[in-house]
Amino acid sequence: MSVELTYLGHSAFQLTDGETTVLVDPFLTGNPAATTSADALSADTILITHAHNDHVGDAPAIAKRTGATIITVNELANYLSGKGLKNVIGGNHGGTISFTGGSVKFTQAWHSSVYNDDGKLVAPGVPAGLVVRYGGVTIYFAGDTALFSDMQLIGDEGLDAAVIPIGDHFTMGPADGVRAAKFLKAKTVIPCHYNTFPAIEQDAGAFKASVERETSSTVVPLKPGESFTVGH
Ligand code: NI
Ligand code: MN
Protein backbone atom coordinates (compact mmCIF):
# COMPACT_ATOMS: atom_id res chain seq x y z
CA MET A 1 0.00 0.00 0.00
CA SER A 2 1.36 3.38 -0.90
CA VAL A 3 0.51 6.97 -1.57
CA GLU A 4 2.06 9.32 -4.09
CA LEU A 5 2.81 12.58 -2.31
CA THR A 6 3.51 15.62 -4.49
CA TYR A 7 4.92 18.86 -3.09
CA LEU A 8 3.08 21.86 -4.50
CA GLY A 9 5.31 24.40 -2.73
CA HIS A 10 5.25 26.08 0.72
CA SER A 11 2.93 23.81 2.78
CA ALA A 12 0.76 22.57 -0.07
CA PHE A 13 0.70 18.87 -0.89
CA GLN A 14 -1.26 16.50 -3.10
CA LEU A 15 -1.80 12.87 -2.12
CA THR A 16 -3.22 10.13 -4.28
CA ASP A 17 -3.81 6.45 -3.66
CA GLY A 18 -4.56 5.93 -7.35
CA GLU A 19 -8.31 6.24 -6.86
CA THR A 20 -8.86 9.56 -5.10
CA THR A 21 -6.96 12.77 -4.58
CA VAL A 22 -6.41 14.65 -1.33
CA LEU A 23 -5.02 18.19 -1.15
CA VAL A 24 -3.46 19.63 2.00
CA ASP A 25 -3.24 23.43 2.49
CA PRO A 26 -3.56 24.16 -1.25
CA PHE A 27 -2.00 27.64 -1.48
CA LEU A 28 -1.16 28.15 -5.18
CA THR A 29 -2.36 31.63 -6.19
CA GLY A 30 0.21 34.10 -4.86
CA ASN A 31 2.58 31.32 -3.80
CA PRO A 32 6.00 32.23 -5.29
CA ALA A 33 7.10 28.59 -5.01
CA ALA A 34 4.11 27.04 -6.77
CA THR A 35 4.75 25.25 -10.05
CA THR A 36 1.10 24.57 -10.84
CA SER A 37 -2.10 26.57 -10.74
CA ALA A 38 -5.19 25.90 -8.66
CA ASP A 39 -7.21 25.38 -11.85
CA ALA A 40 -4.98 22.44 -12.82
CA LEU A 41 -5.73 20.49 -9.62
CA SER A 42 -8.51 18.04 -8.95
CA ALA A 43 -9.55 16.89 -5.50
CA ASP A 44 -11.97 14.66 -3.67
CA THR A 45 -10.93 15.90 -0.22
CA ILE A 46 -9.19 19.09 0.89
CA LEU A 47 -7.58 19.26 4.35
CA ILE A 48 -6.71 22.65 5.88
CA THR A 49 -4.54 22.98 9.00
CA HIS A 50 -5.46 26.55 9.96
CA ALA A 51 -6.93 29.82 8.75
CA HIS A 52 -3.80 31.68 7.61
CA ASN A 53 -4.12 32.60 3.95
CA ASP A 54 -0.95 30.71 3.00
CA HIS A 55 -2.82 27.52 4.06
CA VAL A 56 -6.49 28.11 3.16
CA GLY A 57 -5.14 29.38 -0.15
CA ASP A 58 -7.24 28.25 -3.10
CA ALA A 59 -9.24 25.68 -1.13
CA PRO A 60 -12.57 27.52 -1.49
CA ALA A 61 -12.18 27.92 -5.27
CA ILE A 62 -11.03 24.32 -5.78
CA ALA A 63 -13.89 23.00 -3.64
CA LYS A 64 -16.43 25.06 -5.59
CA ARG A 65 -15.08 23.86 -8.93
CA THR A 66 -14.60 20.18 -8.07
CA GLY A 67 -17.21 19.53 -5.37
CA ALA A 68 -14.43 18.32 -3.04
CA THR A 69 -15.17 18.00 0.66
CA ILE A 70 -13.21 20.40 2.87
CA ILE A 71 -12.20 19.09 6.30
CA THR A 72 -10.71 21.54 8.79
CA VAL A 73 -11.01 22.85 12.34
CA ASN A 74 -14.57 23.50 13.39
CA GLU A 75 -14.71 27.30 13.44
CA LEU A 76 -12.95 27.66 10.08
CA ALA A 77 -15.33 25.04 8.68
CA ASN A 78 -18.29 27.08 9.93
CA TYR A 79 -16.80 30.25 8.47
CA LEU A 80 -16.33 28.66 5.04
CA SER A 81 -19.83 27.14 5.17
CA GLY A 82 -21.16 30.60 5.97
CA LYS A 83 -19.61 31.85 2.75
CA GLY A 84 -21.73 29.38 0.80
CA LEU A 85 -19.36 26.41 0.49
CA LYS A 86 -21.13 23.05 0.58
CA ASN A 87 -19.51 19.85 1.90
CA VAL A 88 -17.43 21.34 4.68
CA ILE A 89 -16.77 19.21 7.78
CA GLY A 90 -15.36 20.63 11.00
CA GLY A 91 -13.44 18.70 13.62
CA ASN A 92 -11.22 19.53 16.56
CA HIS A 93 -8.11 18.35 18.41
CA GLY A 94 -8.20 14.64 19.19
CA GLY A 95 -11.08 13.91 16.85
CA THR A 96 -10.94 11.72 13.76
CA ILE A 97 -13.01 12.35 10.63
CA SER A 98 -13.35 9.82 7.83
CA PHE A 99 -13.25 10.74 4.16
CA THR A 100 -13.38 8.66 0.98
CA GLY A 101 -10.29 6.45 1.16
CA GLY A 102 -9.05 7.49 4.59
CA SER A 103 -9.31 9.52 7.75
CA VAL A 104 -7.75 12.52 9.45
CA LYS A 105 -7.13 13.12 13.16
CA PHE A 106 -6.58 16.65 14.41
CA THR A 107 -3.62 17.30 16.70
CA GLN A 108 -2.52 20.41 18.53
CA ALA A 109 -0.27 23.00 16.89
CA TRP A 110 1.38 25.93 18.65
CA HIS A 111 0.63 28.79 16.30
CA SER A 112 -2.07 31.38 15.52
CA SER A 113 -4.98 31.30 13.10
CA VAL A 114 -6.34 34.47 11.47
CA TYR A 115 -7.88 34.74 8.00
CA ASN A 116 -7.68 37.85 5.85
CA ASP A 117 -10.97 37.65 3.94
CA ASP A 118 -10.53 40.36 1.32
CA GLY A 119 -9.27 42.84 3.90
CA LYS A 120 -11.52 41.73 6.76
CA LEU A 121 -9.59 39.92 9.50
CA VAL A 122 -11.39 37.04 11.17
CA ALA A 123 -10.04 34.47 13.64
CA PRO A 124 -11.96 31.26 13.02
CA GLY A 125 -10.72 28.76 15.57
CA VAL A 126 -7.32 27.39 16.47
CA PRO A 127 -4.55 25.85 14.37
CA ALA A 128 -4.10 22.09 14.07
CA GLY A 129 -1.81 19.38 12.82
CA LEU A 130 -3.19 16.41 10.91
CA VAL A 131 -2.55 12.68 11.20
CA VAL A 132 -3.74 11.36 7.85
CA ARG A 133 -4.39 7.66 7.34
CA TYR A 134 -4.85 7.05 3.64
CA GLY A 135 -3.79 4.48 1.08
CA GLY A 136 -2.50 2.19 3.81
CA VAL A 137 0.01 4.70 5.16
CA THR A 138 0.06 7.23 7.99
CA ILE A 139 1.38 10.74 7.36
CA TYR A 140 1.60 13.54 9.93
CA PHE A 141 1.25 17.07 8.61
CA ALA A 142 2.44 19.28 11.47
CA GLY A 143 0.97 22.42 9.92
CA ASP A 144 2.54 25.61 11.22
CA THR A 145 3.78 24.90 14.69
CA ALA A 146 6.48 25.39 17.24
CA LEU A 147 8.15 22.33 18.71
CA PHE A 148 6.11 20.66 21.46
CA SER A 149 7.04 17.62 23.51
CA ASP A 150 3.69 15.88 22.90
CA MET A 151 4.96 15.19 19.40
CA GLN A 152 6.14 12.02 21.15
CA LEU A 153 2.50 10.93 21.39
CA ILE A 154 2.06 11.56 17.68
CA GLY A 155 5.20 9.52 17.04
CA ASP A 156 3.57 6.64 18.92
CA GLU A 157 0.99 6.42 16.11
CA GLY A 158 3.57 4.82 13.80
CA LEU A 159 4.32 7.39 11.11
CA ASP A 160 5.39 6.46 7.61
CA ALA A 161 6.11 10.12 6.98
CA ALA A 162 6.17 13.38 8.92
CA VAL A 163 5.81 16.67 7.06
CA ILE A 164 7.24 19.42 9.27
CA PRO A 165 7.97 23.12 8.83
CA ILE A 166 11.61 24.21 9.04
CA GLY A 167 11.41 27.82 7.86
CA ASP A 168 11.82 29.42 11.29
CA HIS A 169 10.41 32.94 11.92
CA PHE A 170 6.72 31.81 11.82
CA THR A 171 7.25 28.14 12.76
CA MET A 172 9.93 25.77 13.98
CA GLY A 173 13.32 26.27 12.44
CA PRO A 174 15.76 23.52 11.46
CA ALA A 175 17.24 23.00 14.94
CA ASP A 176 13.83 22.39 16.51
CA GLY A 177 12.93 20.38 13.41
CA VAL A 178 15.70 17.95 14.33
CA ARG A 179 14.26 17.69 17.86
CA ALA A 180 10.78 17.15 16.35
CA ALA A 181 12.16 14.35 14.17
CA LYS A 182 13.49 12.63 17.32
CA PHE A 183 10.01 12.77 18.87
CA LEU A 184 8.13 11.69 15.72
CA LYS A 185 10.27 8.67 14.74
CA ALA A 186 8.84 8.71 11.21
CA LYS A 187 10.41 6.57 8.47
CA THR A 188 10.59 9.66 6.27
CA VAL A 189 10.74 13.35 7.19
CA ILE A 190 9.67 15.84 4.54
CA PRO A 191 10.49 19.50 5.29
CA CYS A 192 8.13 22.28 4.22
CA HIS A 193 7.32 25.95 4.86
CA TYR A 194 10.80 27.14 3.85
CA ASN A 195 12.37 29.00 0.89
CA THR A 196 9.00 30.43 -0.18
CA PHE A 197 9.91 33.94 0.97
CA PRO A 198 13.25 35.50 2.06
CA ALA A 199 12.21 35.42 5.75
CA ILE A 200 12.06 31.61 5.74
CA GLU A 201 15.11 30.68 3.66
CA GLN A 202 16.80 27.54 5.00
CA ASP A 203 19.36 24.95 3.94
CA ALA A 204 17.39 21.71 3.56
CA GLY A 205 20.58 19.76 2.86
CA ALA A 206 22.05 20.76 6.22
CA PHE A 207 18.75 19.86 7.91
CA LYS A 208 18.81 16.46 6.21
CA ALA A 209 22.38 15.81 7.36
CA SER A 210 21.53 16.72 10.98
CA VAL A 211 18.37 14.60 11.16
CA GLU A 212 20.05 11.61 9.53
CA ARG A 213 23.02 11.91 11.89
CA GLU A 214 20.84 12.09 15.01
CA THR A 215 17.84 9.85 14.16
CA SER A 216 17.05 6.81 12.01
CA SER A 217 14.66 8.84 9.83
CA THR A 218 15.44 9.59 6.19
CA VAL A 219 14.86 13.18 5.10
CA VAL A 220 13.44 13.80 1.63
CA PRO A 221 13.55 17.47 0.68
CA LEU A 222 11.26 17.89 -2.34
CA LYS A 223 11.35 20.68 -4.88
CA PRO A 224 7.92 22.06 -5.77
CA GLY A 225 6.42 19.75 -8.38
CA GLU A 226 8.39 16.71 -7.20
CA SER A 227 6.73 13.55 -5.90
CA PHE A 228 7.70 10.87 -3.39
CA THR A 229 6.06 7.49 -2.79
CA VAL A 230 5.16 6.98 0.87
CA GLY A 231 4.97 3.26 1.70
CA HIS A 232 5.86 0.51 -0.71
NI1 NI B 1 0.31 29.98 9.71
MN1 MN C 1 2.09 29.42 7.19
Image: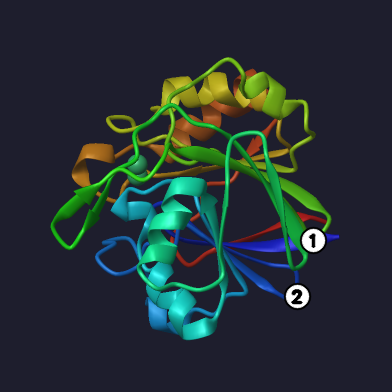
The residue drawn where x is 42% and y is 34% is: 166
> Which residue is at the far left?
119
Residue 65 point in image, percent of width and height: 46, 84
- The residue nearer to you, when weighing 49 against 202, is 49
What is the three-letter code of the residue carrying label 2? Gly
The residue drawn where x is 27% and y is 30% is: 169
Evaluate if marks 1 and 2 touch, with contact meaning CB atoms under 8 Å apart: yes
Q: Can residue 150 be seen in this view?
A: yes
Above or below, 9 against 188 in this view is: below
| Colour pattern of the rendering | rainbow
- The residue nearer to you, when weighing 86 against 114, is 86
What is the three-letter code of the residue carrying label 1? Gly
Name the residue that disc number 1 marks: 135
Q: To which quarter of the image does residue 229 belong?
A: bottom right
Q: To which quarter of the image does residue 194 belong?
A: top left
Among the two numbered marks 1 and 2 on one chain, the one whose residue lies closer to the N terminus = 2
Above or below, 123 against 25 in this view is: above
Label 1: few (<14), some or many (≥20) within 10 Å?
many
In the rendered view, does 214 fall on the left or right side of 111? right
Pick the quarter of the image with the N terminus: bottom right
The residue drawn where x is 35% and y is 36% is: 167
Pick the quarter of the image with the C terminus: bottom right
Q: To which quarter of the image does residue 98 belong?
A: bottom right
- The residue nearer to you, when weighing 166 against 16, is 16
Above or below, 126 against 99 in this view is: above
Q: Is residue 216 visible?
A: no
The residue drawn where x is 28% and y is 40% is: 201
Name the residue that disc number 2 marks: 18
Above or below, 98 against 108 in this view is: below
